[in-house]
Image (spheres, rainbow, N blue to C red):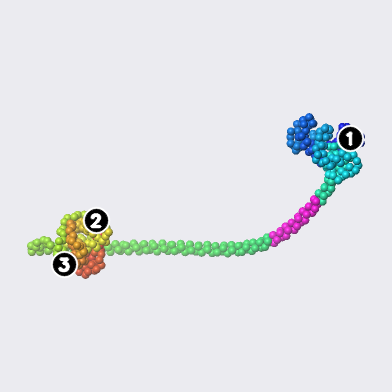
Amino acid sequence: MSAAPHPDTPGGETGDEARDAATLVLPDAVLQRVVSLAAEKLGSLSTTDVPPMLRRVARFAPARRAKLAGPAIAAALDSDVVFRQRVGELAAERLPAVAMLVRDQGVEAVDALDAEDPLEVATMAFLVRSPRWTAVLARASAALQARASDRTDDDRRDQMARLREQLEAVRASSREQLTAARAEVDTVRAENTKLRQRLGAAREATRSAEAQARQAAEGAAQAQTAAVEATNAAAAEGRRLRHRLDEVEAALETSRRGAREDRATESMRARLLLDTLLEAAQGLRRELALPPVVTRPADHVGVAPGAAGVDDVSARGRTVDNPDLLGNLLALPQVHVVIDGYNVTKTGYGDLPLETQRARLLGGLGALAARTSAEVTVVFDGQDLDVPVRLASPRGVRVRFSPGGVSADDVIRDLVRAEPEGRPLVVVSSDREVADGVRRTGARPVASTALLRLLDNR
């Protein structure tokens, strides 16, 4: 921006100053300073004092005025004397000493201005327009340029110093990086050496594993061949054994067939002899006119005073346990079965009351006696009873309670001794002492569990 001559400037301007002002160019710093002062002053001026070109930005904030209307404000300062004077008054209020020196017309005052800030001196000279203001402005501008040049040289020196420091830092960093790279290369070389050693060991282990695998495969093939041979041998042995088994089974069947034929012959002979004996016995009975047997030996053994008689109680029996053992014995003619009552009931259902135990056992024995026609005698231990027990006995079942001071085992032994020698006699008891005793007298002992299973499956 150039400064034009203004005839109304205080003190006026000479022709040389007007020519200098026409060609004078304000430094950027001075221009920014006067525009900032003018933008600040606009807010305090009345509407009539504000230049027309600036009225549209007068309501803005000072910083926004300077930003949006900087060239217009500079033009208004250059062309509008009143506006420039208002801004000069604001600058004089801020820097009164500089304003006084600028208004002074003497050469000494111009020399004294060198001691002030050239930016403030140039700003004040432009706004006040005192005599010789162009010289003051030119001198201040030269000082600003010199200071800027000095600052540029200082900046360059500082920049060179910073660049040297950065270069040294880069060199030091490069040296450190080079050292680190060399160390890393050494580490990599060492690791590479170790890896090569590991690779060699791995290859050796792989070769060894492959050799072992080949040996294992060969061993597996041999084992498979041996297994096939063993399987074939086992199959051949199995066929031989099956053939031998067939021969043995055929021989056994032949033997069984012969045995059955022999048994059939012996059975026929025994049956013929039995029929002869029966017919002879019947002829003898008719010849001697013998009456039928009403009482039996067991009727006179173990009779306690006040004992009960025999009544009818029926039940069905089912066979579960070995029927060839107890069932065949019960099928013998004139067989007498003596049962240790409490030994049987306490073996099968000892958690029930004694009365319920007796009733349950007698119910099953009544059905068994009716089905087999066997003589059945049940002996209960009555030596600890306070009063005689009266109960309904099933048909075909004799019930005895041992008298005071006598155990049921003693009564059973008496019953066995009372029977004639040769009569089939079965004693049901799990008491080892009772079983051994009756076996010596010719009776057949049977465990209580056999009778219980026979009764449970009736």
Mark on residue 355? none
Judge from the rendering whether residue 111 lies leftward or rightward of residue 310; answer left or right.
right
Q: Which amino acid does label 2 sit on?
A: Arg
Q: Give the labeled residue for mark 1.
A: 11
User: Which of marks 2 and 3 precedes in the sequence?
Assistant: 3
User: Which of marks 2 and 1 precedes in the sequence?
Assistant: 1
Q: Does the magenta stretch include residue 169?
A: yes
Q: Residue 126 sits in which quadrant?
A: top right
Q: Residue 66 sits in which quadrant?
A: top right
What distance separates the C-alpha of mark 3 from that of mark 1? 181 Å
* Residue 262, image x, y percentages: 23, 64
Mark on residue 458? 2
Q: Give the labeled residue for mark 3.
A: 418
Q: Nearer the viewer, mark 3 or mark 2?
A: 3
Compare residues 325 and 80 and report the one nearer the observer: 80
Judge from the rendering whether residue 149 lies leftward or rightward of residue 412; answer left or right.
right
**Range of the magenta residues?**
158-186
Q: What element carries label 3?
A: helix
What distance separates the C-alpha of mark 1 from that of mark 2? 158 Å
What distance separates the C-alpha of mark 3 from that of mark 2? 31 Å
Q: Is residue 15 above or below residue 419?
A: above
Q: Is residue 62 magenta?
A: no
Dominant SS of magenta comes to helix
